[in-house]
Amino acid sequence: MDENQKGDKKRTALVTGASAGIGRELALEFAKHGFDLVLVARRKERLEALAQEIIGKFGVNAHVVVADLADPAAPRRLFDEMAARHIPIDALVNNAGYTVSGYFRDTKWDDQKALIQVMVTAVAELCHLFGPGMAARGYGRIINVASLAGHLPGAAGGTLYAASKAFVIKMSESLSLEYQGHNVHVTALCPGFTYSEFHDVAGNREEVSKMPKALWTDADVVAREAYRAVMEGRPVIINGRLNNFLAWLARILPQVPVRKLMARNQRNAKAKTNGR
Ligand SMILES: NC(=O)c1ccc[n+]([C@@H]2O[C@H](COP(=O)([O-])OP(=O)(O)OC[C@H]3O[C@@H](n4cnc5c(N)ncnc54)[C@H](OP(=O)(O)O)[C@@H]3O)[C@@H](O)[C@H]2O)c1
């Protein structure tokens, strides 16, 4: 029998940000492998449509939970709701995310605070809440969606995005070691540019669509590779050869020229966008 299924009772995967993009594809990928799903995001209709698609296509259960992860109470509420409904979570996918565009000094603190809540605090808290139960039951799979940006030096603008992703990578590496021997695998998923709604939400679709096609990956490919990586117990996965090469360059090159390169690219980007 598939180690990811447990006899007559199915395993369950909870995916945050399942209403679009990479999260939607990750939910479909887990369903394809026989997992029941808990789909979490703010847009209820999207989640309900996906739940119907999952039930129809794969014959597994799919539950919808509407939650805004910018609310500090949301992770605990999610955990308590799963406990009350007797749904043990065997796989956790911390995927919900976005960026706050523009220079740090020009943005509202409330927007930056919400980003930290969604992309740092909620990610850590959900791992803290669900991880121990997984270890106690002797099975767990956690995917924390980070980014190639977490491997590169910081750039001006979108300031806390790369910082939050670097946090997620380091935290996942640590948890992956902590849970060794408990059959709980923790993977930081680091996609590069991926086709999704991310850049529409960020408001920079036109600018990024000028990036070379070779840098882009489809969300279903990212999801498939992520599933395989977490099942194999890989602590970090970067999608795509070119993205792996870029992360490797950033790691091995002396930091001074790498930072200069980032600054030059930024000047080019600013020139293209009339200074912003
Ligand atoms: N696309 C890329 O190029 C790229 C590259 C590297 C990493 N990533 C990462 O991949 C992850 C998924 O992004 P994506 O590209 O799939 O973007 P997307 O298509 O815009 O999807 C983002 C998802 O996050 C959810 N979300 C956003 N804010 C939320 C909140 N406050 N509470 C609950 N859910 C929230 C959205 O759902 P609702 O709006 O319905 O709440 C949506 O389902 C993110 O962590 C992102 O940083 C993306």
Image (cartoon, helix red, strand yellow):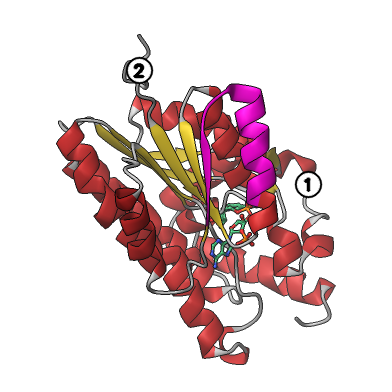
Ligand 1 - quadrant of the structure image: bottom right
Name the mark on residue 8.
2
CA distance for labels 2 and 1? 48 Å
| Prevalent SS, magenta region | helix
Q: Is mark 1 within 8 Å of ligand 1?
A: no
Disc with the residue nearer the chain's start (2 vs 1): 2
From the viewer's perspective, is the residue at label 2 or at label 1 nearer? 2
Determine the residue positioned at 66% across, 37% down.
52
What amino acid type is highlighted by mark number 1? Pro
Report x, y in % for residue 129.
Answer: 26, 55
Using a 10 Å C-alpha cutoff, classify the residue at mark 1 as few (fewer than 14 neighbours), some (14 to 19) or many (20 or more): few
Q: Please indicate whether residue 170 sits to the left or right of residue 49 in the image.
A: left
Q: Quadrant of residue 17?
A: bottom right
Extent of the magenta region: 47-65
Quadrant placement of the N terminus: top left
Magenta run includes residue 261: no
Report x, y in % for residue 97.
Answer: 55, 60
Q: Residue 93 or 268: which is nearer the viewer?
A: 93
Q: Label 2's element?
A: loop
Q: Which residue is mark 1?
A: 212
